[in-house]
Image (cartoon, rainbow, N blue to C red):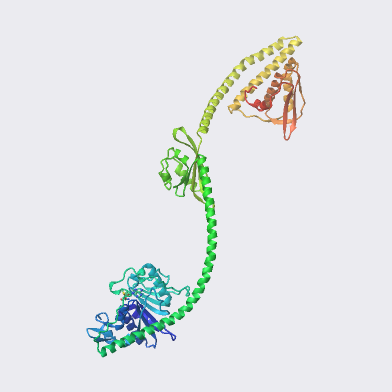
Amino acid sequence: FDLLATETIPALIRGHTGPQPIRIWIAGCSSGQEAYSIAMLIDAALETAAKPCDVQIFASDVDAGALAEAREGVYLDTSGVGAARLERYFTRDGAGFRVKPRLRAAITFAQHDVLADPPFARLDLISCRNLMIYLAPAAQDRLLESFHFALVPGGKLLLGKAETAGAPNLRFQAVSDSARLFANLPRADRGALPVPVSHTRQEHMKAAPPDHRPGVTTPAKVSPKASAAELRAELAVALQELAEARAAQSAQREDALSLSAQYQAANEELLASKEELQALNEELTALNTQLQETLEEQRTTSEYLQNVLYSTNVATLFLNPDLHIRFFTPATRALFSLRPGDIGRPLADLAPLSSDQELLADAQSVLDGTPLIEREIEGQGGTWFNRRVLPYKTSGDTIDGVVITYSEITERHKTHEALANAERVAQHANDAKTRFLAVASHDLRQPLQTLVILQGLLMTAVTDARASGLVERLGETLSAMARMLDVLLDINQIEAGAIRPEKTDFTINEIFERLIKEFGYTARAKGLQLRMVPCGYVVNSDPDLLEQMLRNLVSNALKYTPRGKVLIGCRRRGRGVVIEVWDTGIGIAESEIMVVFEEYHQI
Ligand SMILES: C[S@@+](CC[C@H](N)C(=O)[O-])C[C@H]1O[C@@H](n2cnc3c(N)ncnc32)[C@H](O)[C@@H]1O
């Protein structure tokens, strides 16, 4: 009570204005000591403040027996009262002390159940000590709500040492935690009153102290032998109690009237809220139906997806952002020893059945933003897989994990390997061919050179005109052979990367004329006409390589044309020139045309 005496009560008196009294309620007052202590503090504070001020003190308890003791105001043990107060407020009464009538008259005692009866209202201070500890949490909460309503904003609530005013700053704010003194916070809605519920008190109680069982009343005992004086004293007490009961009743009636108006307003608000709630409820029901439908659709979609995933036979692992397993398809068991219970396990814990050292690092890298990592992984028993790691993206395009897929590529892998082997073998053969041709063309050059010398000697030795012509033709054929050998050597060198085409400007006609001269004899010998369409275009190319190409085409045309003619010509096409060799021979099937440009290919 120190804080009450030094601060709370003096402040209450100091701040009091207006005609209405200061109102104090001691709830669960038991045999009254607490109520008398507060009444003494008020009396002393009023005297100190020297301020005329009307104070109403209500003290209530559910236990009529305890109330009877309180009204009596006689105490055997006054050790905590102090000599000065004992002197001022008590008179000796047999073995004990009785409160003086002035102090007794300051308090109105009333039987009242805090859980079932409406509370007193417009109170400045409530003291309810050591009552709540016997209540169940729900009843405690309702009692606090009731006190919150009964106190004016800023009004004080004093609780027992083991009691608390509920969640901090909900209804009350602590003035002193250690003194268990709280200030009432303003109500958000003054209309919503705590409505007492008519449960039995036993339902609210956790346990009751043996000497304070609620509802136990002590009937007034009047001895049949009582004297007239004793009867008068009993009557005086009874009249006093009647007066108090009336005072408490009239205070409660006043409160009840003001409460009734507030109940009315609250009731109207409740009705309006109820209608709103009904409308809201209908909306919620509609929304709920929609949600159910959406949920059903999602379930179906999820089943479709699962079927698709399972039917593709592509092993698929879904990982969360911590690289723990979210989901996997049955095909994954070819690569990891996985069981359904492994969902939620870290990927790092899985025993891989493949030698995939980079898997964790790849998954982390994709989580960090790499769009895709693809690798070929060897599985068990010579199987091969194409492993792809992709980010798992949400509809908001944020990365929320990783998807790993494994598609089997064993056949493709075998084909690739076979191809690579074949390529190696072909390359080997090609190298051998190149070496052979290089050697062969060198070896052929030697006898050819001898033939050229012999042809020169023959030319000087022959006098007959026809024989001279034949020797001259022989010379041209030998020159063509020499050029072919040169080109053969060149092709080898090109293949070996040794030479590059040397481009220069020249007229196409020069090549045409040389070819007509070179193949004229062969054509005539076969009874064929070999002609050229003269052409004045100047082109930029390698003349030797171009001539060799045309030589092949003309020689081929003559070879496969039994009768008729072979014609060489050219025409302009865009920024280039198209050279054509026409013949009346057997021709080449459409499908084979491109093949003739391949090396050493014969149709
Ligand atoms: C342990 S005593 C506390 C007395 C006093 N406040 C004190 O601290 O010394 C608890 C009192 O609360 C009373 N009580 C219990 N339930 C009550 C209720 N529902 N309404 C009013 N008083 C109640 C009991 O009858 C008892 O007198």
Residue 567 is at least partly visible in this image: yes
Residue 397 is at least partly visible in this image: no
Which x, y percent locates residue 491?
A: 62, 25
The quarter of the rendering in which ligand 1 is drawn is bottom left
Which x, y percent locates residue 576?
A: 72, 33
In the picture, measured across the screen, residue 498 lies left or right of residue 368, that is: right
> Quadrant of residue 347 in the image?
top left
Please count the marks in the image: 0
Q: Using the image, determine if residue 230 lies above or below residue 489.
A: below
Q: Quadrant of the N terminus?
A: bottom left
In the picture, measured across the screen, residue 397 lies left or right of residue 578, that is: left
Considering every residue shown, the one lying at the far left of the view is: 95
Q: Report the front residue among 239 and 133.
A: 239
> Quadrant of residue 217 in the image?
bottom left
Considering every residue shown, the one lying at the far bottom of the view is: 229
In the picture, measured across the screen, residue 348 lies left or right of residue 443, that is: left
Q: Report the front residue among 297 and 500.
A: 297
Which x, y percent locates residue 261?
A: 48, 79
Which x, y percent locates residue 326?
A: 46, 47
Considering every residue shown, the one lying at the far front of the view is: 224
